[in-house]
Image (tube, rainbow, N blue to C red):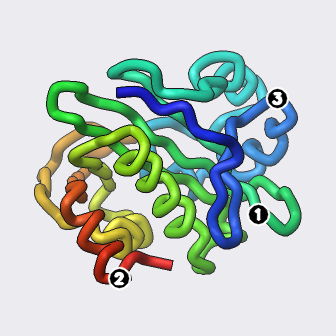
């Protein structure tokens, strides 16, 4: 199982594409914010953190093997402005499992961009990589991400109480998932999110 997307991956209003060094300032604009990083497993980043990531794992353009992950920039098709990024990780070849995650500049929240980007990424996961199951692990306090996952058709499967010592306190985690059968049924019924 491998994924070599034809870039950019297009949706109605967005383009998903590999990140590059020219994206440093746009990434810094939201990944440096405390409130944006509140529920994710890293602290706000500075320019050197972002440069290090861009020269390492964030430079991947494909999923060639189990354990690989893509971090794709989410840009507005109309302007080319980078407004967020989205992750697709290939977790298990045997079980055909993956994980999705997203981060969006708060100035662009509430406009459906994250849902649109995640939906396009699920097309990569199911239609091209051939996954059977994709999960999202969300901090229980992160209501916007929980709503986004549910709009995608992901169901809540686990509520893990005091699951991790996270940024100075115990945190609860909600695990959500969507199966390839659910994904196909959504599209046959015309009920996929927009």
Q: Which residue is mark 3?
A: 21
Q: Residues within 10 Å of mark 2 (few under 14, many from 20)?
A: few
Q: Which residue is mark 2?
A: 191
Percent coordinates x, y for residue 181 in the rendering: 19, 60
Q: Quadrant of residue 31?
A: top right
Q: Quadrant of residue 175?
A: bottom left
- On screen, residue 59 above or below 9: above
Q: Residues within 10 Å of mark 1 (few under 14, many from 20)?
A: some
- On screen, residue 32 above or below 90: below
Examine the rendering and report whether any part of residue 176 can be seen: no
> If you read the primary sequence from the N terminus, does the residue marked by circle 1 or circle 3 appear first?
3
Numbered disc 1: secondary structure: strand
Q: Residues within 10 Å of mark 3 (few under 14, many from 20)?
A: some
Q: Is residue 145 left or right of residue 180?
A: right
Examine the rendering and report whether any part of residue 138 can be seen: yes
Q: What residue is at 44 percent from the left and 55 percent from the top?
A: 123
Numbered disc 3: secondary structure: helix
Badges 1 and 3: C-beta atoms under 8 Å apart? no
* Foreground pick, 8 / 40: 8
Percent coordinates x, y for residue 182 in the rendering: 21, 65
- Residue found at the far bottom of this picture: 190
Q: CA distance from mark 1 to mark 3?
A: 18 Å
Q: Which residue is mark 1?
A: 76
Q: Is residue 169 left or right of residue 114?
A: left
> If you read the primary sequence from the N terminus, does the residue marked by circle 2 or circle 3 appear first?
3
Q: What's the mark number on residue 94?
A: none
- Quadrant in which the N terminus is drawn: top left
How many callouts does the rendering have? 3
Looking at the image, is mark 2 or mark 1 nearer the viewer?
2
Percent coordinates x, y for residue 122 in the rendering: 42, 54
> If you read the primary sequence from the N terminus, does the residue marked by circle 2 or circle 1 appear first?
1
Percent coordinates x, y for residue 178 in the rendering: 24, 58
């Amino acid at each position: 199982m491998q994924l070599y997307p034809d870039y950019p991956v297009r949706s109605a209003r967005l383009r998903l594409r590999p990140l590059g060094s020219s994206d440093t300032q746009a990434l810094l604009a939201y990944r440096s914010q405390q409130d944006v990083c509140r529920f994710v497993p890293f602290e706000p980043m500075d320019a050197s953190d972002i440069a290090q990531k861009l020269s390492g794992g964030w430079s991947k353009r494909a999923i060639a093997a189990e354990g690989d992950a893509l971090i794709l920039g989410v840009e507005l098709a109309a302007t080319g402005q980078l407004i967020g990024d989205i992750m697709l990780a290939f977790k298990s070849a045997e079980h055909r499992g993956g994980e999705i995650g997203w981060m969006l500049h708060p100035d662009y929240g509430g406009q459906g961009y994250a849902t649109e980007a995640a939906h396009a990424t699920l097309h990569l996961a199911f239609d091209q990589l051939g996954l059977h199951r994709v999960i999202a692990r969300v901090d229980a306090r992160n209501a916007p991400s929980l709503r986004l996952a549910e709009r995608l058709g992901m169901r809540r499967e686990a509520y893990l109480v005091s699951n991790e010592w996270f940024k100075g306190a115990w945190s609860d985690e909600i695990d959500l998932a969507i199966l390839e059968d659910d994904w196909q049924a959504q599209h046959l019924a015309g009920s996929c999110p927009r």
